[in-house]
Image: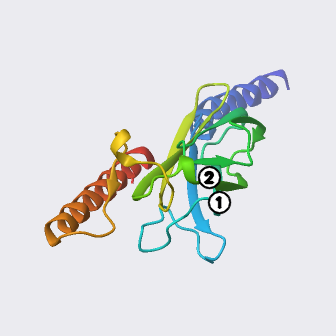
Amino acid sequence: MKKLFFAFIILVSSFSFLVSPVLAEDEVRKLMLDLKVKGFSQTVWQDNLSSSNIIFAPGDKFQVQVKIRNEGNRNQTQVKVRQTLPSTVTSDSPVEFTIPQISAGQDYVKDITVTVKNKTDVYKALTNNSLRFTAKSEVGTESSDFAAFYTSNGTKDIAKSNTPVLPKTGAASTLIFGSAIAAVLAIAGLKLRQAVRGY
């Protein structure tokens, strides 16, 4: 009987040893932050707002959706979210806030209202702006994303600033130059977004 018992123990131990590597799960920690934006008059969230979509004037408000997905297989705790805004806007969210936990495979979603400042803080000319959000967990898992939008109709003089702007009117060559700048900015933003997301 003892021999049979010891044989059973050895058999169970051997089986456990053989299958344990198969059952073991590698630790994966991955956050994916995605920003979407839209004006209050719009119905569809977008990655960026082009000047052909909508242009914001002083006092206008628009929405930003912050979505953070835990794509790993471990819970992410104490996730610090930080916003970096251009000088032309304010938001109804703190500069930094902490999410206690995002469970594996789950999303955290927060809608934020952004307000364009008054005329003295906004340029007269059509101006490209971008805002960025970064999320970082207590173990260092990090992700970030940005969203672009346009403003105009302020009183701030562009001649006193290095901020890039696009012309609203002018000769054909000026419009072509402005369109080229817009295309370069759009392509650079897309490539940066793809590099950050990995696809």
- Left or right of 74: which side holds 154? left
Question: Is disc 2 in contact with disc 1, using a CB cutoff of under 8 Å?
Answer: yes
Label 2: which residue?
118
Give the quadrant of residue 2.
Answer: top right
**Mark earlier in primary sequence (2, 1):** 1
Numbered badge on residue 59:
1
Of residues 101 and 130, which is closer to you in this image?
Answer: 130
Q: CA distance from mark 2 to mark 1?
A: 6 Å
Q: Amino acid at mark 1?
A: Gly
Numbered badge on residue 70:
none
Give the quadrant of residue 17.
Answer: top right
Of residues 123 and 188, which is closer to you in this image?
Answer: 123
- Image position of 39 with respect to 155: above or below: below
Quadrant that contains the C terminus: bottom left
Q: x and y percent of residue 18 in the render? A: 58, 33
Residue lying farthest to the right in this orientation: 1
Quadrant that contains the N terminus: top right
Q: Amino acid at mark 2?
A: Asn
**How many numbered marks appear?**
2
- Element class at badge 2: loop
Q: Is residue 70 visible?
A: no
- Element class at badge 1: loop
- Image position of 57 with respect to 193: above or below: below
Residue lying farthest to the left in this orientation: 173
